[in-house]
Image (tube, rainbow, N blue to C red):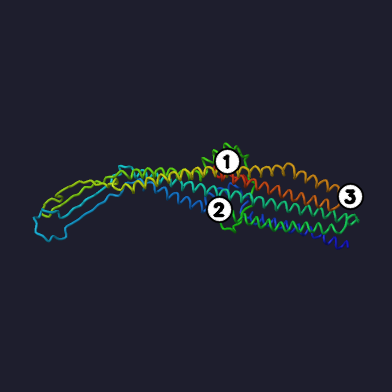
């Protein structure tokens, strides 16, 4: 019976060694490609290489080129005519035989300036789309970085707990050798070790998933190895509601896009009113008669313009449509502002909740569980408590330490989401463009 018991306990060091090998493999494989990965490096690489950001930037560059197009005058019109044949008898200079004319429309109504304002507002919307893409990919990259850091930390906790379980097994084996323990405790220890090994598999899967996510966001091959992450130094956030509300309404891309849409509709309304004003087209025509000796026999100037006042229904409907669209854009702006404040409140509540969890586990729950584990260890070694009490305390400490680390990761990700909601740098995370990374 004792032989069976000792064989069962011998599995514990073996399992612990296997878990350590997995942990070392996960770290070693990525360490070959760099000593460490910092959140600043991830941020810089994402902003420089992410395809979605590049796509939005190209669209913005294209939209900017629409502004000079809209502001430009209409192209001048050049026309020429020549007699091909005359089938009546007339004097040589009775009719012209060749004519060349040039015509230019003069935008005195300012329609081109209105169109330029519309193009500028649309270009601003495209720029805010760039900012939204940048903000979104940064939030995703930072959250993924924190989850990757958490996966490494959880693997380290897993390894330490296996070592602790190995120590527990050694003590229990010694007590069994002198008849102070039962064989059933071996099965408990083995079960706990198996659970830890199963968790290690899940953690390695989570680690690989976050590495893939970060690689994709940095526009790298998903299978490219990454160095182990370094814990990010996060600043203490200023969570003043008044300050964050003002920042959100002033910087959130969705609000600024809605505001740009209002400006565009104002320019369209102005353009609709200016469509009532005709823009004259001036022309200069040179004519030549067949019998004339001069290259130009006659030089004429002319002017022409449309008569919009005769199409009252068309232009009145155009003005009415622009007025309705402007009112709709103002309502859309109000909706964007209201929704943004709602998202801000949700994000703040999430941050406050996650921070409460972090502080509670860090300052109270985990220290208490650690004290309980030490107390049960002392009681077990002195014979005042059973093996089940000790292993239960160890399991409880292990779970609470894992939850505490998970809460920290959730809190960090919530801060990244808060910054994405506000749409402004809240000085929480290290900037991507200042100084060198500390490794």
Disc 2 target residue: 218
**Which circle's residue, 3 or 2, is located before the other in the chain?**
2
The residues bearing labels 3 and 1 have C-alpha atoms spaced at a distance of 55 Å
Secondary structure, mark 2, is loop
| Residue 158 in the image, given as x and y percentages of width and height | 73, 53
Q: Is residue 243 left or right of residue 67?
A: right
Mark 3 against mark 2, which lies toward the viewer?
Answer: 3
The residues bearing labels 3 and 2 have C-alpha atoms spaced at a distance of 57 Å
Dividing the picture into quadrants, the one containing residue 204 is: bottom right
Label tally: 3
Q: Given the current orientation, which residue lies at the most extreme right position? A: 179
Q: Is residue 2 left or right of residue 156?
A: right
Q: Residue at x 23, y 53 (%)?
A: 79
Q: Quadrant of the N terminus?
A: bottom right
The answer to which of 328 and 402 lies nearer the viewer is 328
- Badges 3 and 2: C-beta atoms under 8 Å apart? no
Secondary structure, mark 3, is loop
Dividing the picture into quadrants, the one containing residue 269 is: top left
**Which circle's residue, 2 or 1, is located before the other in the chain?**
2
Mark 2 against mark 1, which lies toward the viewer?
Answer: 1
Query: Residue 383 — which label?
Result: 3
The residues bearing labels 2 and 1 have C-alpha atoms spaced at a distance of 23 Å
């Amino acid at each position: 019976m004792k032989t069976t018991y000792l064989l069962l306990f011998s599995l514990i060091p073996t399992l612990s060694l296997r878990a350590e090998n997995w942990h070392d493999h996960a770290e070693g494989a990525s360490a070959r490609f760099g000593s460490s990965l910092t959140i600043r490096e991830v941020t810089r690489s994402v902003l420089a290489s992410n395809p979605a950001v590049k796509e939005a930037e190209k669209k913005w560059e294209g939209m900017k080129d629409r502004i000079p197009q809209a502001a430009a005058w209409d192209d001048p019109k050049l026309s020429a005519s020549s007699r091909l044949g005359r089938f009546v008898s007339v004097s040589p200079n009775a009719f012209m035989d060749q004519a060349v004319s040039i015509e230019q429309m003069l935008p005195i109504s300012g329609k081109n300036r209105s169109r330029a304002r519309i193009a500028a507002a649309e270009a601003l919307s495209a720029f805010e789309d760039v900012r939204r893409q940048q903000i979104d990919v940064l939030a995703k990259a930072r959250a993924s970085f924190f989850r990757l850091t958490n996966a490494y930390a959880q693997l380290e906790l897993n390894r330490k707990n296996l070592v602790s379980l190995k120590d527990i097994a050694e003590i229990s084996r010694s007590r069994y050798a002198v008849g102070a323990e039962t064989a059933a405790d071996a099965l408990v220890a083995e079960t706990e070790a198996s659970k830890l090994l199963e968790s290690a598999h899940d953690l390695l899967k989570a680690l690989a998933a976050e590495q893939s996510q970060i690689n994709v966001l940095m526009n790298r091959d998903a299978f490219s190895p990454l160095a182990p992450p370094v814990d990010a130094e996060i600043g203490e956030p200023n969570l003043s509601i008044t300050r964050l509300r003002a920042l959100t309404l002033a910087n959130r891309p969705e609000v600024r896009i809605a505001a740009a849409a209002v400006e565009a509709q104002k320019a369209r309304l102005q353009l609709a009113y200016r469509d009532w004003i005709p823009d004259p087209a001036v022309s200069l025509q040179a004519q030549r008669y067949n019998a004339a000796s001069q290259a130009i026999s006659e030089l004429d100037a002319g002017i022409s313009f449309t008569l919009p006042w005769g199409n009252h229904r068309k232009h009145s409907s155009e003005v009415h449509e622009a007025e309705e669209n402007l009112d709709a854009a103002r309502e859309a702006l109000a909706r964007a502002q209201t929704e943004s404040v709602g998202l801000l409140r949700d994000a703040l509540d999430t941050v406050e909740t996650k921070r409460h969890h972090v502080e509670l586990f860090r300052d109270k729950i985990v220290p208490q569980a650690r004290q309980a584990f030490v107390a049960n260890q002392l009681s077990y070694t002195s014979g005042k408590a059973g093996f089940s009490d000790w292993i239960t305390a160890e399991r409880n400490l292990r779970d609470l330490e894992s939850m505490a680390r998970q809460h920290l990761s959730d809190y960090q990700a919530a801060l990244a989401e808060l910054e994405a909601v506000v749409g402004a740098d809240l000085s929480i995370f290290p900037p991507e463009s200042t100084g060198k990374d500390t490794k």
